[in-house]
Image (cartoon, rainbow, N blue to C red):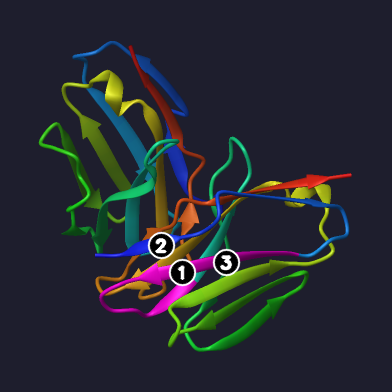
Amino acid sequence: DAGVIQSPRHEVTEMGQEVTLRCKPISGHNSLFWYRQTMMRGLELLIYFNNNVPIDDSGMPEDRFSAKMPNASFSTLKIQPSEPRDSAVYFCASSFGGSSYEQYFGPGTRLTVT
Amino acid sequence: GQSLEQPSEVTAVEGAIVQINCTYQTSGFYGLSWYQQHDGGAPTFLSYNALDGLEETGRFSSFLSRSDSYGYLLLQELQMKDSASYFCAVRAAGNKLTFGGGTRVLVKP
C-alpha cells in the first residue's frame, strides 16, 4: 500500500487567502485524524472522522477551520481566511477500526502564511 | 481532559540505554502508545501498552503501570539512527490519542 498521501507537501500563502489541504487515507482504514504540529503547541488533534462521519472536532481552533470527508478515500482541511499563526505542519493519519492507538501518519503539509 | 509529561531532551552515547518516562493524567484510560519522529518526518508507531507490564520489540521496550499512571520507553543498544523525538500518547475515551510534548533523544558517537 502507498501509505497515507497528503498534498500539497508545502504551501506558502498570504494572509487572508484560502488554503485547502488534502488527504487520502490507507485503503481499508475507517478512522481519519487531522493534526497540527508546532514547536510551541506540539502535536494537537484538530478533528477525527470515523466511517466518514466527524466524531470530535473539539480541537478545531476556530470557525476559520473546517474539515470534510466526502468518502472513505478522501478528506480535506480548509482554512479560510488564513492567518500567520496558522503556520505549522499539518498531518493526516488513519487507523483501522478501534485500533486508534496505532495510527499511520502521512508525510505532512508544511504551511507558511505570510 | 488529558495531560502528559515527559522530559524535553535526553543525550546519550552509542550503545547506551535510555529510558524515557511518561506520566499522565486522564479521565478514562485505555492504553499508552509510543511514537518516533525524525526531524522533518512524520510520527511512526512504535508500541502500545494496554495492560501493566513490559512489551519488548527488538531493541525497544515499553512499560506501563496503570496504578501509577506511568509508563516508559526503553531504548537499548542506542544507534545514531535513534536520534529523534519520542512521543507518548494516551488513548482515552473517544477513541483518540492525546500526545505528550515529546522527548528529543540525541545520540552521540
Q: Chain of mark 2?
A: B
Residue at 32 percent of width and 73 percent of height: B92
Quarter of the view holding residue B97 = bottom left
Foreground of the two, A46 or B75: B75
Q: Secondary structure at mark 2?
A: strand
Q: Check disc 2 and report the residue beneath it.
A: B4
Q: Residues within 10 Å of mark 3 (few under 14, many from 20)?
A: some
User: x, y (%) of residue A89?
Assistant: 42, 34
Residue drawn where x is 44% and y is 64% of the image: B89
Residue designated by label 1 = B23
Q: Main secondary structure of the magenta part?
A: strand
Q: Marks 2 and 1: same chain?
A: yes
Please state which amino acid type lies under the numbered disc 1. Answer: Thr
**In which image quadrant can residue B7 be found?**
bottom right
First along the sequence among labels 2 and 3 = 2
Query: Which residue is tagged 3?
Result: B21
Q: Where A33 sits versus A108, above or below?
A: below
Residue A62 in the image, given as x and y percentages of width and height: 13, 37
Per the rendered image, the range of residues in magenta is B18-32
Q: Amino acid at mark 3?
A: Asn
Q: Residue at x 46, y 43 (%)?
A: A5
Disc 2 + disc 1, Cβ < 8 Å: yes
Instruction: Name the side, left or right, on which A59 lies relative to B108.
Output: left
Q: Secondary structure at mark 3?
A: strand
A99 w.r.t. A5: above or below: below
Mark 1 nearby-residue class (10 Å; few <14, some 14–19, many ≥20): some
Q: What amino acid is found at the position of numbered circle 2 in the picture?
A: Leu
